Image (cartoon, rainbow, N blue to C red):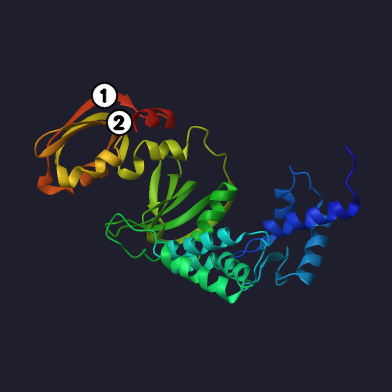
Amino acid sequence: MAKRSDTKETVLLALELMRRVPRKRKISAKELCDQLADTEVARDLRTIQRQMEMLSEHFDIERDERTKPYGYCWKEQSAGMALPTLSEQESLLLLLAEQHLQSLLPPNLMKSMAGFFTQAHVNLAPYSKVKQEQNREWLKKVRVVSTTQPLLPPTIMPGIFEKVSDALYSNRWLNVDYKNAAGKSTKAEVMPLGLAQQGTRLYLVCRFKDYDDERCLALHRINSANISIRSFERPKDFDLEKFDNDGRFGYGNGKLIRLNFRIEKEAGFHLLESRLSADQTVIEHEDDYEITATVVDTAMLDWWLRGFGNGVKNIHKDDLGIFCHSSAVLSAAN
């Protein structure tokens, strides 16, 4: 294979560096050098420093020279790594995502996405007036509809999401001051393992120091967070997908049951179209449906059943004596 020219190598390095420069926090040349260590564009620290100095002079990259090592980030109103090949349809979908996320994410997190949405608007601007009007009309023709009572997202303290996500990304311990639902405050060192959005809420899945079980901390209940200099090796026995499949976000432990209940036809008709599981069976009676399905037993399942009030009756749960240990098992059940 022919060796790439020095010019091409330099361009590829510059593009890779710009892609890795964050928006909301500073990153040092040493961190960038470490990130590129196992890539095709790996370079020594001095080369990375020279490249970042050049990029900060010619692009909207801010260089913080108040302390060493210098920190780099995209300027607040910068388009960042713009995607000139983003198609018209992709730009429209991104703007649709903006509408959807406004009801799910707190304002400070939406602000962190502003550059991407701005780029979508910019990509659509060059079109003719007729085309621009069609684009605006299209966004009014589609909508994501909530299946539950719409709720405003809880307020997350400034800087919490950035600290949590940075610690999660870099496998570093996190010191948190957390207030639980009962109002009790706890200061602890936790091992961040995963981040999940459930409705309008964001949760950090973590392990407390000296414990090997997982807990979920709501980000809006974290009063403060500081990233430790200490790193950790991510536990090989933890898998976020399995954690979800086990029903842990629904307050379950992965126990599979055979669920049987009867539901009034008007309330239960949607279950004929959106099944509880792949093995769901339905027996139609005169006034109701008898539903049988293999599901994970969770508190969320109980809340869902109670939500039908008197429309659901004769609820039976048969413990199958097995646990959902993988996505494959859940796929068979759901």
* Quadrant the C terminus occupies: top left
Left or right placement of residue 54 versus residue 236 in this view? right
* Drawn side of residue 89 relative to residue 148, left or right: right
Q: Label 2 near label 1: C-beta < 8 Å?
A: yes
Residue at (68, 60) in percent of width and height: 21
Task: Identify which residue, 195 or 90, lies in the foreground.
Answer: 90
Identified at 40% across, 29% down, the residue is 325
Q: Answer few, some or many: residues within 10 Å of disc 2's Cα (few below 14, many 20 plus, some between 14 and 19).
A: some
> Residue 121, percent across and down?
57, 70
Q: Is residue 156 visible?
A: no
Q: Nearer the viewer, residue 69 or 45?
A: 45
Residue hosting label 2: 255
> Where residue 275 is drawn, which disc sits there?
none
Left or right of 175: which side holds 9? right
Residue at x 47%, y 37% (from the top left corner) = 239
Determine the image quadrant of residue 56.
bottom right
Residue 172 spot, x, y in % from top left: 56, 49
Question: Circle 1 sits in a helix, a strand or a loop, which is it?
Answer: strand
- Please tell me in which quadrant of the rendered image residue 221 appears: bottom left
Q: Amino acid at mark 2?
A: Lys
Identity of the residue furthest to the top in this view = 321
For this orientation, the residue located farthest to the bottom is 129
Q: Mark 1 or 2 closer to N-term?
A: 2
Residue ranking furthest to the front: 130
Picture disc at residue 320: 1
What distance separates the C-alpha of mark 1 from that of mark 2? 8 Å
